[in-house]
Image (spheres, rainbow, N blue to C red):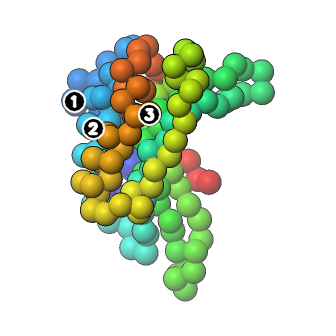
Amino acid sequence: MDTRDSEHILGEMLAENGLDYSDPDPLLAWEVFKKFAQEPISDPGVTEGVLFQCGMFKFTDEGEDLFYLDFVRQYWFSDSDGEYDHTEHVHCELKASPTPQLRRIETNLWAEECTPLQQFFSQVEALHEFQIAVQHRPYTLEVSHERV
C-alpha cells in the first residue's frame, strides 16, 4: 500500500465491512482499523506507528468540547539522506457529544510501547477507557490523512 492511498483504502475497508456512516459502530471501526494497521506499506524509507487515543477536545474555537475516539496510523518520512523529513497521520476518528461518563476518560497508547502489534490491540481492548468509549452511541466518523 502506498501511504498516499491510506485514507482512501481505510475508507474502502470500512465500507466493505458494512460500516454505516450515519450511525457508525465503534467496535466495527476498530476491527477494520486493526486490519488496516497491518497492511504493509510500499514506501521506501518510511517507518510507522499506531496510536489509540480518546478524550475531550475542542475542535474549533467556537465549538463545544467533544469526546473523540481516535485510531491513528502514523508515518515518519525520511529524505534522500535518511534524515527525518516529516510525519503524516491517518485517522479513523469518532466524535460524540460528551456524557458525564465520557468526560471522565482520557488516555493514549502507542503500539511501540508493546510489541507485537497483536499485543497492542489486546492492551487497547483491555483499557477501561476503550471499554467505556466503544459502548457509547451515537458517534460521527471521519477518516482523514494529514501532514503534521
> Which of the 4 quarters of the picture holds residue 128?
top left
User: What x and y, as percent, mark residue 21?
Assistant: 38, 19
User: What x and y, as percent, mark residue 63?
Assistant: 72, 20
Precedes in sequence: disc 3 or disc 1: 1
- Seen in the picture, residue 41 relative to 60 is either above or below; the reply is below
Alpha carbon of mark 3 to alpha carbon of mark 1: how far? 25 Å
- Kindly identify which numbered label has been placed on residue 129: 3
Badge 3 marks a residue whose secondary structure is helix
Identify residue type, mark 3.
Answer: Glu
Q: Is residue 30 left or right of residue 109?
A: left
Alpha carbon of mark 1 to alpha carbon of mark 2: how far? 7 Å
> Which of the 4 quarters of the picture holds residue 11?
top left
Badge 2 marks a residue whose secondary structure is helix
Q: Which residue is mark 1?
A: 17
Q: Which residue is mark 2?
A: 32
Which residue shows up at 56% across the image and 47% down it?
Answer: 146
CB-based contact (under 8 Å), mark 2 and mark 3: no
Identify residue type, mark 2.
Answer: Val
